[in-house]
Amino acid sequence: MVSIVLRTGVIVSAGVIVVGLILLAFNGLAGMTGGIATAMNFPHTFGAVLSGVVKLDPVSVITLGLLLMIITPVTRVAVSIIAFAMERDWRYVGITTVVLIVLLVSFALGKAGS
């Protein structure tokens, strides 16, 4: 189960990033002055990412791929809790639950700090 989650997460996120890069290539970078970072509008919220993906904004699609890449190991930890519970290995269920809580709290604190 865990390896399927990891493989699927990496393949899907890489695919989304490639789609974003293809969109970026078709939209072209011609006419951009001041460098790529000043010419592009980077989404800063999940809502902005989804809104940009609906509009096929290349930067939003790439950002979605990166977010999927970040979520993949967190999903692996959650799946590990289920796998350990199915095996009735309660010690590892507890340890892995603590790891998941630490990950989620770190995301929340990181968001609060920005």
Image (cartoon, helix red, strand yellow):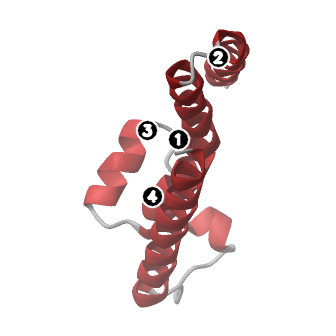
Give me the residue at 64% from left, 17% from top.
89
Q: Distance between the residues labelled 2 and 3?
A: 36 Å
Residue 1 in the image: above or below residue 90: below
The furthest residue to the front: 87
Position of residue 83 measured from the top left corner of the image (x, y, whole percent): 54, 30
In this rendered view, identify the residue nearer to me: 49 or 98: 98
C-beta proximity under 8 Å, tags 1 and 4: no
Q: Distance between the residues labelled 1 and 2?
A: 40 Å
- Residue at image mark 1: 44
- The crowd level at tag 1 (other Cα within 10 Å; few <14, some 14-19, many 20+) is few
Q: What residue type is labelled 4?
A: Ser
Position of residue 90 measured from the top left corner of the image (x, y, whole percent): 64, 10
Is residue 31 something that shows in the picture?
Answer: yes
Q: Residue 89 carries which label?
A: 2
Q: Distance between the residues labelled 1 and 4?
A: 10 Å
Position of residue 86 measured from the top left corner of the image (x, y, whole percent): 50, 24
- Residue at image mark 4: 60
Element under label 4?
helix
In this rendered view, identify the residue nearer to me: 88 or 1: 88
Position of residue 112 measured from the top left corner of the image (x, y, whole percent): 63, 17
Question: Does residue 47 appear to the left or right of 70 in the view shown?
Answer: left
Quarter the C terminus occupies: top right
N-terminal label among 4 and 3: 3
Q: What residue type is labelled 2?
A: Asp
